[in-house]
Image (cartoon, rainbow, N blue to C red):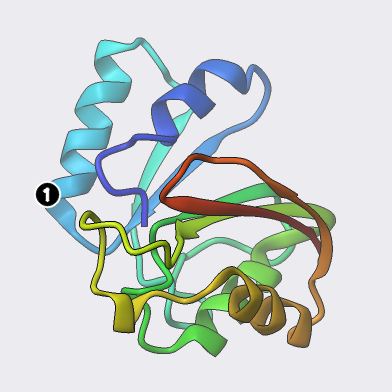
Amino acid sequence: GAGTGFYTIPAGKIVSMGKVYAIEVQRDFLITVKNKAVEAHLDNVECLLGDVEKIGGTKLKDKIIDAVIASNILFQIEDKDKFIEEIKRILKSEGKLLLIDWSDNGSVIGPSFDKIISKDKAREMFESKGFIWQRDIDVGDHHYGIIFSK
């Protein structure tokens, strides 16, 4: 989900036309994001209480989103298939997905090793659901980044 808005607030500053949706299952996190958006005078950020592990759980219409950022979430998701399907459902035909997640580099920060989904496994999961790998991006020592198109 959106967490406390690490990506939401910068995205809200970049996106001049349209909306940035912060979707989170924890109400307290959404309150934090909303407060940060108000402080930053961002009226294009909309906070939605939703469950990304359910089809329709984001409460967004089909094919209305240009880009999704999914960061540090795979290790928390129980139903990864539904998570991927929900992203696919809300993305426009030419939509993009930026997936950022923990790498298995032996770091002491982040989730336990057994919960980490490797970059190769993540790519395989998304490609098996019809996403097209575009490129890998460098996002630091403890993470991997992959850009997919729909």
Secondary element at tag 1: helix
Q: In this view, does 13 lie to the left or right of 146?
A: left
Identify the residue position indicated by label 1 in the image.
28
Please tell me which residue is depicted at 36% across the width and 74% down the height of the picture: 75
User: In this figure, what is the number of numbered marks?
Assistant: 1
Give the quarter of the image for residue 150.
bottom right
| Image position, residue 149 (x, y; %) | 82, 59
Which corner quadrant of the image does residue 102 belong to?
A: bottom left
Say above or below: 148 vs 29. below
Vertically, is 92 above or below 22?
Answer: below
At a point 59% along the width and 69% down the height, the residue shown is 119
Q: Which residue lies furthest to the left in this view?
A: 28
Q: Position of residue 53 (x, y in %)?
A: 42, 80
Which of 131 and 142 lies nearest the eye of the viewer? 142
Other residues around mark 1 within 10 Å, as few (<14) / some (14–19) / many (≥20): few
* Front in this rendered view, residue 135 or 60: 135
Q: Position of residue 100 (x, y in %)?
A: 52, 53
Q: Where is residue 79 in the image (x, y as percent from the top left)?
A: 43, 89
Please identify the quadrant where the N terminus is shown: bottom left
Q: Is residue 25 left or right of residue 125?
A: left
Q: What residue occupies the far front of the structure in this picture? A: 106
On the rendered structure, is 13 left or right of 127?
Answer: left
Relative to the observer, which residue lies in front, 60 or 37? 37
Which amino acid, mark 1?
A: Asp
Q: In this view, does 126 lie to the left or right of 141?
A: right
Residue drawn at x 39%, y 58% as measured from the top left: 72
Residue at 47 percent across and 65 percent down: it is 59
